[in-house]
Image (spheres, rainbow, N blue to C red):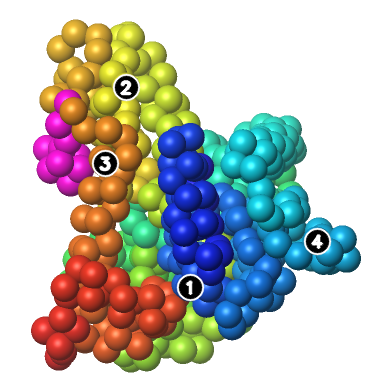
Amino acid sequence: MLAKVLVVDDEIPLAKLICKSLMQKGFDADMANSGDEALQLLAAHNYHLVILDYKMPGMDGLEVLKAIRETYPDTRTIFTTAFGDDDLAIRSLEMGADDFIHKPCDLKNLHFRIQKTLKFHSLQAEVETLRCQVHDTRTPFIASCPEMLDVIRCIGQVAQAGAPVLINGETGTGKELVSSAIHNSPANPRKDKPFITVNSAAISENLLESELFGHARGAFTGAVTVKHGLFEVADGGTLFLDEISSAPLSLQAKLLRILDSGEFMRVGESRTRKVDVRIFAATNRDLNIEVSKGHFREDLYHRLNVLQIQLPPLRRRGADISLLIDHFLDQFNKSAGRSVKLSKQARDALSAYAWPGNVRELKHCLESLVLLTPGGRVAVADLPDRVLSAAAVSVDSSFTELKSRTIEKFERNYFKSLLNNASGNVSQAARIADMNRIYLIKKLKEYEIDPTEYKA
């Protein structure tokens, strides 16, 4: 994966020169000419490193550095200044800068410092990954990005607690995998008890209550025997409620009761029963928005949201895509008795694709390629149409071009969906996306998207 660098300097010719030299060295470089612009770009992109000047209009470099350290702790920084002040160098390093360079700086020296900083922190990340794997060799995750490493670290801490867990993430990001890992963690006192999974969206509203709480004989037409609900089956263990946002409001009140007291009644009975079940819930929707629309009970949301885990989409996991490609290729080659490999161009195309279905989509794609590709090598032409059309792949496409096209298509579709969900309200859309409003307006103008077309 290309290292992504942000150059922050109000001397525009110098910033352009540095960006050009970095791109010639194989980096992906952007520039900002003020602290405010830098923070807007940081809010929208995952930068590995920021080259930060001290004297700028508005916020100075130290103020920007403070904001980076507080909000983006995994982003590395190299501080620069034309003022030969050793005290300033010490202050920047004390505030968390990884290096300090006096201006004017030699480009060769700058490139060396960048490589040194990134290599050091890459080694740190590898050590942290190995430490996580050693801590629990049963972890089911293939991950190296900071966000996923945080999730892995969090699993053991969450496992030993007894409170409900709310797992947020897009479809296909691995919410059920996380819930299973929490339950099976050595730190979980319930690990040897039942772990029951139910998809709230896959069962009709009429049957869901009976599935969860059971029913008495004769409770409704077809209820010819007593049925034990999943809460009873999971007694002493864990019940995972997937797609909790799909649960009807009438059922949500009963879920709140069982969370508060452990008490419930079977359908068609007046007798109160009691169970000891820990609840994990997952959703691919923003429950705050569902609450504001009246689709989800606010009291239930707060009761579920005691411990929260946020799973990043695959498009934000950087080098993890390549790790997952290797993992799934190896897995499906072994199970099929094949030795299928990817051409460099096919791998670049898969790495650049946005994967709206996340890890699940990538897994199914690799399984299909292993099983259906004639011969032992996957070429670009063998890739699914959705990957080819999204990236506009040609055999002459460079990785940078491919990535740029993919990002543009993803952003355009994302902003349209965002405005549709927010009924054309730009401020609300910015809040949903956790994005700076000014930056969102800028991107909408760039893609010529008119918010008024999405007004309800």
The CA span between labels 1 and 3 is: 25 Å
Residue at figure coordinates x 20%, y 78% from the top left: 420
Name the residue carrying label 2. Answer: 344
Circle nearer the viewer, 3 or 2: 3
- Percent of width and height locating residue 453: 11, 84
Disc 2 is placed on an element classified as helix
Q: Earlier in the sequence, mark 3 or mark 2?
A: 2
The CA span between labels 2 and 1 is: 36 Å
Location of residue 277 by image quarter: bottom right
Q: Earlier in the sequence, mark 4 or mark 2?
A: 4
Circle nearer the viewer, 1 or 4: 4
The CA span between labels 4 and 2 is: 47 Å
- Percent of width and height locating residue 303: 56, 81
- Percent of width and height locating residue 294: 33, 91
Disc 1 is placed on an element classified as helix
Q: Amino acid at mark 4?
A: Gly
Between 198 and 346, the residue placed more toward the observer is 346
Bin the neighbour count of mark 2 within 10 Å (Cα to Cα): few under 14, some 14-19, many 20 and up: few
Quadrant occupied by the C terminus: bottom left
Direction from residue 156 to residue 266 in the image, left or right: left
Magenta span: 384-395
Direction from residue 19 to residue 93 in the image, left or right: right
Q: Amino acid at mark 3?
A: Glu
Name the residue carrying label 1. Answer: 37
Name the residue carrying label 4. Answer: 84
Direction from residue 13 to residue 60 in the image, left or right: right
Disc 4 is placed on an element classified as loop
Residue at figure coordinates x 70%, y 62% from the top left: 81
Name the residue carrying label 3. Answer: 401
